[in-house]
């Protein structure tokens, strides 16, 4: 199967012929970005005139919430592992990369969607790769790219959010309701609030054997008890969540003046909480030549709430008033 010569009809025929029979997780990762798709079974034969009620519902699959929990937690554990791996962290001090001033660091952003995919070897006689073909892979890529807009490390689609266990759903934050490029379907997008600044993941390191035992003994209570998950989310407080949710609701309802007030309050709560908890004590000291006031400004710029600031920016571009045709969602204009 040569994708360079394939027509849409041939590609469809290929997907039908190679229907996925198992449930698994697929991903493509690099140092800087990752996309992950929760893959569910796809019927071998799919008619263009198929009744929607006959299509496969992921929520109907036995154990799907446990499977989805594991996929998301695995992604979060990868995030923690990046900032626990001393070899990766040492790259920051490598003169060849950072010019001696720490200009280089290793970071990663993640996107996840849920759905079917065709897994297999795709290519030609000149080059062949093991890959996944699916609109859901594309959606995961859209989620990953949108992380940059919202200033977060992790974005999950509505499809993923709906499949998590109840306790897992409560840990997510609904950021916005959008359509993505290439799709007209509106959906809620979520993040798991994760930060590494001020978190010592070394304290929570586990051996491979211990990690295997934890995985085998999985229960949904891990969302509440796992040290990594708790540490990366320790900057989130109830009053922050309350203000942000109120602001997001007003924003979606088209009540933008009050939405801006709520979201600015949420952003200030986030910044003040981070300062109060001492995440930047090493930087914010009187001996620093840059001065305490300059450093506080830098901290505010770096550690404010990205989603709050993004929604405020969207509204301020329209002078703080929702357009007459506002429908409670917006398109994400970039991939």
Image (cartoon, helix red, strand yellow):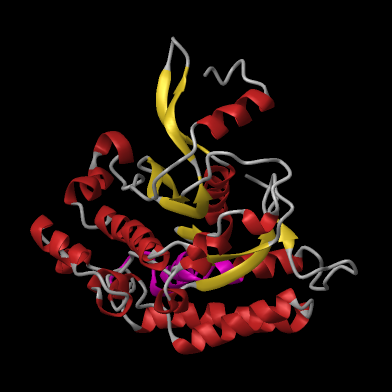
Residue 186 painted magenta: no
Q: Percent position (x, y) of residue 226?
A: 25, 73
Q: Is residue 120 above or below residue 279?
A: above
Q: Residue at x 24, y 50 (%)?
A: 89
Residue 300 painted magenta: yes
Q: Is residue 4 above or below residue 213?
A: above
Front-most of 6 and 77?
6
Q: Is residue 8 left or right of residue 153?
A: right
Front-most of 10 and 236?
10
Q: Is residue 8 above or below residue 220?
A: above
Q: Is residue 180 left or right of residue 156?
A: right
Residue extending furthest toward the right: 324
Q: Percent position (x, y) of residue 225?
A: 25, 79
Q: Is residue 223 above or below residue 26?
A: below
Q: Residue at x 24, y 40 (%)?
A: 94
Q: Percent position (x, y) of residue 284?
A: 34, 73
Residue 63 in view (yes/no): yes
Which contiguous range is marked in magenta? 286-308
Q: How many marks?
A: 0
Residue extending furthest toward the top: 125
Q: Quadrant of residue 214?
A: bottom left
Q: Is residue 169 left or right of residue 212?
A: right
Q: Residue at x 63, y 85 (%)?
A: 246
The rendered magenta stretch, by its main secondary structure, is classed as helix
Front-most of 106 and 13?
13
Say which quadrant the C terminus sits in. top right
Front-most of 287 and 1?
1
Q: Quadrant of residue 130?
A: top left
Q: Residue at x 68, y 27 (%)?
A: 8
């Amino acid at each position: 199967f040569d994708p360079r010569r394939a027509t849409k009809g041939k590609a469809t025929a290929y997907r039908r012929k190679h229907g996925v029979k198992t449930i698994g997780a697929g991903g493509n990762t690099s140092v800087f970005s990752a996309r992950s798709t929760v893959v569910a079974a796809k019927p071998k034969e799919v008619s263009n005139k198929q009744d929607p009620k006959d299509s496969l519902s992921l929520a109907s699959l036995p154990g799907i919430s446990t499977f989805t929990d594991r996929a998301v937690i695995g992604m979060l554990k990868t995030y923690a592992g990046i900032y626990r791996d001393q070899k990766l962290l040492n790259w920051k001090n490598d003169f060849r990369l950072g010019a001696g001033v720490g200009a280089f660091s290793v970071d990663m952003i993640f996107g996840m969607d849920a759905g079917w995919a065709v897994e297999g070897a795709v290519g030609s006689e000149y080059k062949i790769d093991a890959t996944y073909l699916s609109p859901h892979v594309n959606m995961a890529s859209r989620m990953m790219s949108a992380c940059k807009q919202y200033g977060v490390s992790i974005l999950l689609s509505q499809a993923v959010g709906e499949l998590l266990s109840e306790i897992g759903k409560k840990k997510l934050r609904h950021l916005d309701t959008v359509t993505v490029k290439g799709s007209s379907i509106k959906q809620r997008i979520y993040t798991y609030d994760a930060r590494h600044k001020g978190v010592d993941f070394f304290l929570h390191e586990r051996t491979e054997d211990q990690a295997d035992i934890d995985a085998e003994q999985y229960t949904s209570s891990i969302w509440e008890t796992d040290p990594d998950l708790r540490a990366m989310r320790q900057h989130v407080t109830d009053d922050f969540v309350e203000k942000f949710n109120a602001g997001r609701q007003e924003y979606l309802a088209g009540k933008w003046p009050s939405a801006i007030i709520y979201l600015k309050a949420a952003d200030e709560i986030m910044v003040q909480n981070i300062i109060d908890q001492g995440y930047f004590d090493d930087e914010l000291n009187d001996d620093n030549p840059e001065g305490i006031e300059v450093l506080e400004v830098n901290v505010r710029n770096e550690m404010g709430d990205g989603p709050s600031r993004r929604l405020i920016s969207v509204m301020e571009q329209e002078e703080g008033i929702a357009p007459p045709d506002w429908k409670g969602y917006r398109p994400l204009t970039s991939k």
